[in-house]
Amino acid sequence: MSDRFLKYLVSALALLVVAWLGARFIAGLGGTGEGAPFELASLSDAEIDSVVIASPEGTVHLVAGDEWTVNGYDATAEAGATLTRALGQAAIGNLVGRNPENHERLGVDGAAGRTVTVYPSDAAPVSFIVGEQAQVLNQSYVRRPGEDEVYTLQGSLVTLVSRGPDDWRDKTILGAAREDIQRLEYDYSDESFALELTPEGWTIEPSGATADPSFVNGTLSQLAGLRAIGFAPDSVISTLGWDSLTSELRVLGPGGFVLGDLMFKKREEEQGVGYYIRRAGSPVVYTLSTFSGDQILKRESAFIGETEDESSD
């Protein structure tokens, strides 16, 4: 028997083993390859009242409207369109199995899976459980509550249902464009001053000094469209005292229009590095990186370009 023949024989046996294992897997699942009896494409933006995603980590409650909300907070501007587009494009594939004993392994037993319930405005709710990721990219297993059949779910909906509440929330702290910012009013515990845009450039009040454009530009770059990196958890919010602040900053636009009143509080070392920040009158507490916070919260001497040693002389 030649070596070449032996190689062919081994290859053929390997293919038979793979085919046998595949057959055993399908048999264990009880799959038949039948098509799915339900679909999601009929759900459109105008028809949806809300969507609830329940998982072991918690519940995400998205409510439709001119501006969508998530768990009572403002959602991102694109949240509604992203979700409804994903629902409409989701593809329910072939039947994978109908053996209830395999539900836990596939993550669709209801305990480990993510139960998604879509509430249309003019129809009965549609619920389905999204389980473990399948072998194909953007594909998971899916089952309807009360039914044994498990199918594949293909599309971006697979990843969207894994988002937590904060992933859906609007992280915009200040939506002003850079060209709209005309004045900055800083209030520290030991120093207060303002930067005013004049025809000659940025001027510091009340000293009348001219601010260095490069330092002002660094601040404006951070302030324009300022976004948080996240949100302070409720356990931290309850411990924050806003009577003692690192700084307050009022951002004004043309004609003295207030674009934002921002309150900054330096985070304690044991809580991590960075800043807590909130808008005056709002209960939402954002988290901001150290770099962004330091670029925004400059002292008067820093805008002039003085070093700490020079400013202390």
Image (cartoon, grey):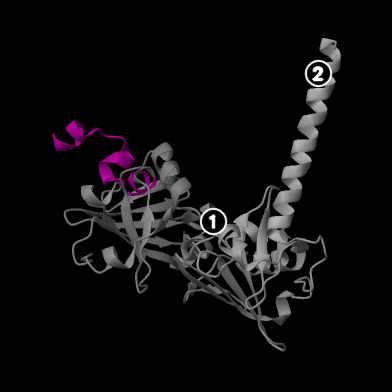
Of circles 2 and 1, which is in front? 2
In the image, residue 42 sits, relative to residue 292, either above or below, namely below
Q: Earlier in the sequence, mark 2 or mark 1?
A: 2
Residue 4 colored in magenta in the image: no
Q: Categorize mark 2 by other alpha carbons within 10 Å: few (<14), some (14-19), many (20+).
A: few
**Residue displayed at 60% across by 56% down:** 132
Q: Where is residue 170? Give x, y as percent.
A: 51, 64
Q: Cβ–Cβ below 8 Å for labels 2 and 1?
A: no
Q: Secondary structure at mark 2?
A: helix
Q: Amino acid at mark 1?
A: Ala
Q: Where is residue 162? Give x, y as percent.
A: 55, 60
Q: Which quarter of the image is occupied by the C terminus?
A: top left
Q: Amino acid at mark 2?
A: Lys
Q: Which residues are magenta?
A: 292-313
Residue closest to the far left? 313
In the image, residue 177 sits, relative to residue 64, either above or below, namely above
Residue 307 colored in magenta in the image: yes
Residue closest to the far top? 2
Residue identified by numbered label 2: 7
**Residue displayed at 27% across by 46% down:** 299
Report if residue 155 is visible in the image: no
What's the mark number on residue 148?
A: none
In the image, residue 178 sits, relative to residue 212, either above or below, namely below
Cα distance between the residues tagged 2 and 1: 68 Å
Residue identified by numbered label 1: 177
